[in-house]
Amino acid sequence: MLWSKPESERAGTPLLVLFHGYLANEEDLMGLADYLPGDFTIASVRAPQALGPGYTWFPLMHEPDFSLQRVVDAVSDVDGWLQQVRGQHTSVSLLGFSMGMAVASTLLRHRPADYAAVVGLSGFVLPSEEDPFFRDAELAARRTPFFWGRDQADPVIDQPRIEFTNDWLNGHTALTKVLYANMGHSINMQELGHIREFLTHTVLRGAGTDAAS
């Protein structure tokens, strides 16, 4: 895990937790910290399973060893850590890229009351198969602010997952959706500006206070 602030400077700050994508690591997203509001303490978490040049949170959905339980196990470990540290912070928000968006959204679905806002970048939301780990009805009642940015021509996330994610986010969150041309499966400067605005409005200016309490 990487932190943007030393331990002595973290207490009393809003926490933003980053979740990298498939075959990346905790260093992959820390470069975003320079473009996000400095009020946040930012923590970037490494996925648990080493694979190829990096790490993965769970097997890809088309692979034979994928299961929702593998997702729940990985997210439960992160959830346990968050329960230990969240009391030090004024709020907790989540940001996930690609597969990391599935992790961030699953954490939100497990504890809808715990998070001020969520940012999902070039990623997707997983079908819950009515697993009780996912408290989707509670989340739909709360409507946590959720930013979803992507390129409409993203070559990695297939159309069925995009359609499911779009329907699910519209039905369960206060969704801000932005499409970016010629970005591919990545993040661009325009999107970083929008994320900064979103986090400033929903978290730092108090719009996300209820969700964080």
Image (cartoon, grey):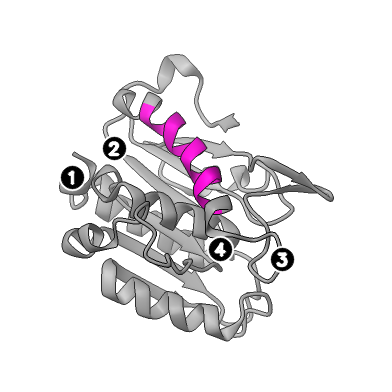
Q: Which of 192/178 is in front?
A: 178
Q: Residue at label 3?
A: 64
Q: Residue at label 4?
A: 189
Q: Which of 145/206 is in front?
A: 145
Q: CA distance from mark 3 to mark 4?
A: 37 Å
Q: CA distance from mark 1 to mark 2?
A: 8 Å
Look at label 1 and name its amino acid: Thr
Quarter occupied by the N terminus: top right
| Disc 3 to disc 4: CB gap under 8 Å | no
Element on which disc 2 rests: loop
| Marks 3 and 4, the one that precedes in the sequence | 3
Look at label 4 and name its amino acid: Met
Look at label 3 and name its amino acid: Pro
Q: Residue at label 1?
A: 209
| Marks 1 and 4, the one that precedes in the sequence | 4
Q: Quadrant of residue 209?
A: top left
Which segment is the magenta one? 71-83
Given this view, does label 3 or label 4 mark the residue nearer the observer?
Answer: 3
| Disc 1 to disc 2: CB gap under 8 Å | yes
| Disc 2 to disc 4: CB gap under 8 Å | no
| Marks 3 and 2, the one that precedes in the sequence | 3
Q: Position of residue 124 (x, y in %)?
A: 51, 68
Instruction: Tell me the residue at 46%/47% (across/down).
Output: 36
Q: Residue at label 2?
A: 91
Q: CA distance from mark 3 to mark 2?
A: 38 Å
Residue 153 shown left or right of residue 144 in the figure: right
